[in-house]
């Protein structure tokens, strides 16, 4: 009887109760993740450190990948034109694409929420997200095409003849064209999450602020932006991950060219695995990719705690 | 009043600009390619035809109609399962303080970085061993697993914006953890769940690689798998290809347009409580 | 537990079931049993009529030209065949996991030749069906350890610069017979009102540009040069090769060649007479409005043109290896190949197929090719294959818009060339 009581007490101890509840709530997700992601991924990481016979080779593949000018060609970095190497291209992608996507997504979510026909407008922005991969790259390619592209036609129309040629054919402009196109495709993502974030902000906050005499800009700055911080964190993290893994658009629009000017990490991994049939090198690129995300992830959890 | 009008005008201007790249695709599916070589905005000659859509739908080697049906069979469970399991896990990570739960969360976030191409071989072997190869169930489980990291990440952060006081009040009323979750947390997260659903549905729908690896019975192929089958080694019929893409895109767009009501409902739900 | 928690139980049951399934099946006995059972069932069914899956890259019109061969094979060999479309790019992702699990999605698969050589351990030795046919073929497979793992099918060629006969007549133009006449022709075309550039450059993932380069190499260095480059005996920085690039090709870039244009779009622009010439393979005949208006010429003095084929192999894991081999043997036989070329769009890779087997447009081409010393010079990038193939395309696309980088491009090609 006394033992029963004791057991009951353990059962009801807050920490044990929390632990059990935690397992009940997260268990199903963890099982699926372990079986379908972690187990195969670990095998991939192992592959990047071992050769075909299974012997441990240390960092050999990583050294070979990093020594490849496709990965790292920093001597050509500005003022030289691409190729700068996939690592640099991915970094440039993040530097240009991330601020544009986050800012545009927020502006669109705020502006479109108040407009007539918001549903239609948001669906239009969302089009980029549902475009099948083999079409996304094709759209970008034809937007910047000398003969059939509307952007080049407009640029020629306003007298910028030099920009009126096919952007994806020239190493100077190919990367820019792809990044701009990828903003078009991706903004729907940040817009949707921001729309959901906006819905969590109680109306009363704005009403109270209005009573205190705050204008719309002040309200936006002091209520909307702080309230959207958790959502912004997710958007930034997911967008960086998407930029690091960017593949389909480049594959269909330029195949990493011309002259490697749009080579990115994921495409390089694809070429290692399915063209060169060097799966270990491909695994090394994949592991490198995960390493970069590790950094993003560390930053992310840090910021989240504060 | 004029400022209001200004916002509508700006919003519609943005919408139209965003639509432009897409018009090229619509034109390409409706008009012969020869009319488009100098840009779709050249309207003479102007010939319209729906033949490309009909051909894509009933294509002899890859009928898209069947593909869209198969996609629905896969995508509906592949959206519901990870959303539900993910919301539970997100709530668990947010509310229960357990040693190492932050580390575990970090690991899950990091998993999003793994490129799908790299797990192909081990995953294929595993699916064969458990007999889930070439089955919808297998693909649904894989999609669910791969969706979970970001669903958990997003919903955990979304839930963190909801004030804990409501839950505390309910807990004082004698409701247990699960009742709090189903009766209070889930209804409050409708806008977040609707967003996550829109995105997960889109991603599962647009997935090409996992389906390519895991489904190979010709009758089971999903829509995105069939689009490349419409183009051969040399022959690229842009008309049929773009028509097929539009048909494929129509489902997620429609779902998205319908789902938006739920953002608003979530907002209303909040103000009513 | 509250009544509302029933769903939690359901979720747990599903996951538990899954885990059990995952843990239970890997035990060897269970696997063996299931395999045996399915095999027996299939054998009972397939003993009488084996069903073979053929995987090829052809869709649309190209597929319609191929399926009559399969129909004939069904009748002759007493088998059933289903055809499925997968292009090599997709197969390169589908096959490795399947092979690693000792499975195959098809019984006869058309795939890059270099890829099959690299994966020879997963392919069936076809030496026996090839031996009797070998001497009839213009193209020979490269053996791996003395064995043949893939065999050539029908031929496509890249015969030179195509023009519209009506366009040439209207403007008083003639196909050139010397290099100077070629340059003069380009000047004349460029001067025609409405013409943007004399030659339109096609651009896919890059192969159309590579094809033009190869045509220049073969014309000015002979088919031998192309073969030496493939074998790695001659480098791209070799003075002979560099000279062909620097003196023949580079001066034409920018002046006469357009920037790379998506190659199907290029057909329409060229047919619209905004450009005079288009370099493309013979499949072009099936893609223009009026094939009878098509003319083609090689660069003056060319002793050979590139001819290539699609290669077929049988994966080891096919359940019907013998039937699959019989099917391949039929496809590459004189009879099988005549059925295919009769449909148009492709030429025979066998020497014993008579010109009468072709439809008119292809017959003209086949006869023109008969005049050329070597109508099936191996394709440079197809033969080298691997990652170098797409690297070569990519560097040529760079050269097209940055001709001043010629030396860097040639050095890059050498540096990346596969050793062996």
Image (spheres, rainbow, N blue to C red):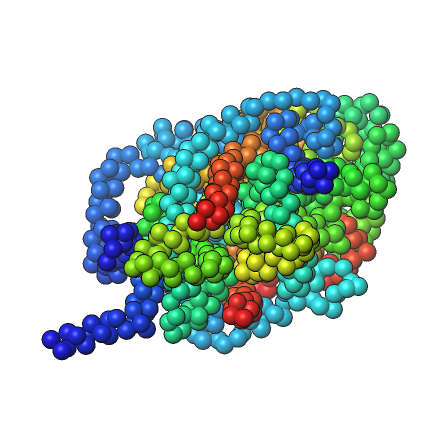
Residue shown at 62% from the left, 42% from the top: A114
Q: Left or right? Give the position of C26 relative to C169.
A: left
**Quadrant of residue C139 in the image?**
top right
Q: Left or right? Give the position of A236 relative to B112.
A: right
Nearer to us in this view, A153 or B59:
A153
| Quadrant housing the N terminus of chain B | top right
Q: Position of residue C416 (x, y in %)?
A: 64, 62
Q: Position of residue A127 (x, y in %)?
A: 58, 41
The answer to whether one can see residue C303 in this image is no
Nearer to us in this view, C263 or A87:
A87
Residue shown at 51% from the left, 30% from the top: B56
Q: Position of residue B219 (x, y in %)?
A: 38, 36
Q: From this view, report whether residue B45 is shown above or below residue C215.
A: above
The answer to whether one can see residue A117 in this image is yes
Q: Left or right? Give the position of C219 relative to A219.
A: right
**Quadrant of residue B147 in the image?**
bottom left
Q: From this view, report whether residue C401 is shown above or below residue C163.
A: below
Residue shown at 54% from the left, 74% from the top: A60
Residue shown at 72% from the left, 30% from the top: B41
Q: Position of residue B17 (x, y in %)?
A: 69, 39
**Quadrant of residue C265 in the image?**
top right
């Amino acid at each position: 009887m006394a033992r029963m009581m004791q057991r009951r007490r353990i059962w009801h101890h807050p920490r044990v109760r929390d632990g059990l509840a935690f397992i009940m709530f997260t268990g199903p997700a963890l099982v699926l993740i372990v079986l379908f992601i972690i187990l195969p991924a670990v095998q991939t990481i192992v592959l990047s450190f071992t050769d075909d016979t299974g012997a441990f080779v240390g960092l050999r593949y990583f050294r070979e990948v990093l020594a490849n000018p496709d990965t790292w060609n920093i001597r050509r970095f500005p003022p030289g034109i691409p190729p700068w190497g996939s690592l640099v291209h991915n970094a440039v992608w993040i530097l240009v694409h991330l601020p544009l996507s986050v800012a545009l997504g927020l502006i669109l979510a705020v502006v479109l929420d108040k407009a007539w026909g918001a549903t239609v407008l948001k669906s239009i922005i969302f089009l980029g997200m549902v475009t099948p991969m083999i079409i996304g790259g094709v759209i970008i390619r034809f937007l910047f095409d000398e003969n059939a592209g509307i952007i080049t036609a407009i640029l020629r129309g306003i007298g910028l003849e030099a920009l009126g040629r096919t952007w994806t054919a020239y190493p100077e402009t190919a990367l820019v064209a792809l990044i701009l196109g990828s903003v078009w495709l991706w903004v729907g993502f940040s817009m949707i999450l921001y729309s959901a974030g906006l819905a969590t902000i109680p109306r009363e906050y704005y009403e109270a602020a209005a009573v205190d005499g705050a204008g719309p800009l002040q309200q936006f700055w002091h209520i909307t932006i702080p309230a959207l911080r958790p959502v912004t964190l997710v958007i930034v993290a997911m967008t960086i991950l998407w930029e690091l893994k960017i593949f389909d658009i480049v594959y269909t629009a330029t195949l990493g060219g011309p002259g490697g000017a749009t080579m990115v990490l994921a495409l390089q991994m694809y070429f290692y695995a399915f063209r060169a049939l060097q799966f270990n090198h491909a695994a090394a690129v994949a592991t490198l990719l995960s390493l970069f995300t590790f950094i993003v992830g560390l930053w992310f959890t840090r910021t989240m705690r504060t | 009043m004029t400022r209001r009008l200004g916002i509508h005008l700006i919003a519609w201007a943005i919408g139209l600009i965003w639509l432009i790249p897409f018009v090229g695709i619509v034109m390409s599916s409706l008009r012969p390619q020869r009319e488009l070589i100098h840009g779709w905005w050249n309207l003479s000659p102007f010939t319209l035809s729906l033949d490309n859509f009909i051909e894509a739908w009933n294509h002899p080697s890859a009928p898209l109609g069947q593909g869209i049906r198969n996609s629905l069979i896969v995508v509906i469970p592949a959206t519901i399962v990870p959303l539900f399991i993910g919301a539970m896990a997100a709530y668990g990570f947010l509310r229960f303080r357990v040693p190492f739960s932050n580390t575990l969360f970090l690991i899950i976030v990091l998993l999003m970085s793994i490129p799908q191409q790299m797990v192909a071989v081990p995953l294929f072997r595993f699916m064969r061993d458990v007999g889930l190869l070439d089955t919808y169930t297998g693909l649904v489980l894989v999609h669910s697993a791969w969706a979970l990291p970001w669903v958990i990440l997003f919903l955990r952060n979304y839930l963190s914006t909801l004030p804990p006081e409501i839950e505390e009040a309910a807990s004082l009323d004698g409701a247990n953890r699960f009742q709090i979750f189903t009766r209070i947390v889930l209804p409050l997260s409708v806008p977040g769940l609707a967003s996550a659903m829109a995105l997960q549905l889109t991603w599962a729908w647009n997935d090409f690689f996992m389906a390519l690896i895991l489904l190979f019975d010709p009758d089971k192929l999903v829509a995105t798998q069939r689009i490349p089958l419409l183009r051969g080694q040399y022959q690229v019929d842009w008309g049929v290809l773009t028509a097929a893409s539009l048909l494929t895109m129509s489902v997620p767009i429609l779902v998205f347009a319908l789902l938006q009501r739920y953002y608003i409902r979530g907002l209303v739900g909040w103000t009513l409580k | 537990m509250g009544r509302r928690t029933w769903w939690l139980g359901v979720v747990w049951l599903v996951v538990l079931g899954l885990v059990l399934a995952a843990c239970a099946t890997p035990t060897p006995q269970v696997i063996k049993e299931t395999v045996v059972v399915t095999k027996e069932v299939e054998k009972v069914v397939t003993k009488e009529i084996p069903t073979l899956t053929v995987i090829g890259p052809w869709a649309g019109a190209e597929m319609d030209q191929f399926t009559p061969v399969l129909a004939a094979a069904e009748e002759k060999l007493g088998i059933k065949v289903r055809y499925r479309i997968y292009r090599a790019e997709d197969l390169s992702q589908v096959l490795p996991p399947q092979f690693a699990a000792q499975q195959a999605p098809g019984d006869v698969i058309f795939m890059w030749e270099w890829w099959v050589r690299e994966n020879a351990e997963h392919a069936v030795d076809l030496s026996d069906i090839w031996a009797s046919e070998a001497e009839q073929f213009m193209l020979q497979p490269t053996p791996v350890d003395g064995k043949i793992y893939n065999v050539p099918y029908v031929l496509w060629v890249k015969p030179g610069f195509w023009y519209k006969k009506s366009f040439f007549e209207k403007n008083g133009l003639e196909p050139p017979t010397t290099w100077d006449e070629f340059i003069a022709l380009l000047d004349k075309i460029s001067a025609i009102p409405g013409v943007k550039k004399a030659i339109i450059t096609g651009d896919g993932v890059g192969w159309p540009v590579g094809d033009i380069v190869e045509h220049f190499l073969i014309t000015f260095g002979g088919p031998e040069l192309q073969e030496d480059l493939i074998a790695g005996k001659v480098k791209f920085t070799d003075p002979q090769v560099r000279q062909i690039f620097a003196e023949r090709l580079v001066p034409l870039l920018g002046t006469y060649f357009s920037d790379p244009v998506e190659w199907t779009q290029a057909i329409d622009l060229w047919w619209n007479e905004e450009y005079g010439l288009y370099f493309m393979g013979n499949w072009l005949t099936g893609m223009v409005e009026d094939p009878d208006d098509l003319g083609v010429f090689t660069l003056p003095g060319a002793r050979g043109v590139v001819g290539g084929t699609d290669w077929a192999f049988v994966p080891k894991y096919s359940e019907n290896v013998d039937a699959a081999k019989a099917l391949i043997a039929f496809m590459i036989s004189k009879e099988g190949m005549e059925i295919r070329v009769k449909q148009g769009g492709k030429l025979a890779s066998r020497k014993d197929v008579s010109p009468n087997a072709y439809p008119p447009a292809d017959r003209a081409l086949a006869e023109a090719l008969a005049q050329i010393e070597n109508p099936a010079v191996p394709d440079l990038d197809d033969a080298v294959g691997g990652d170098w193939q797409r690297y070569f395309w990519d560097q040529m696309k760079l050269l097209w818009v940055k001709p001043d980088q010629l030396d860097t491009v040639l050095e890059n090609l050498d540096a990346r060339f596969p050793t062996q």
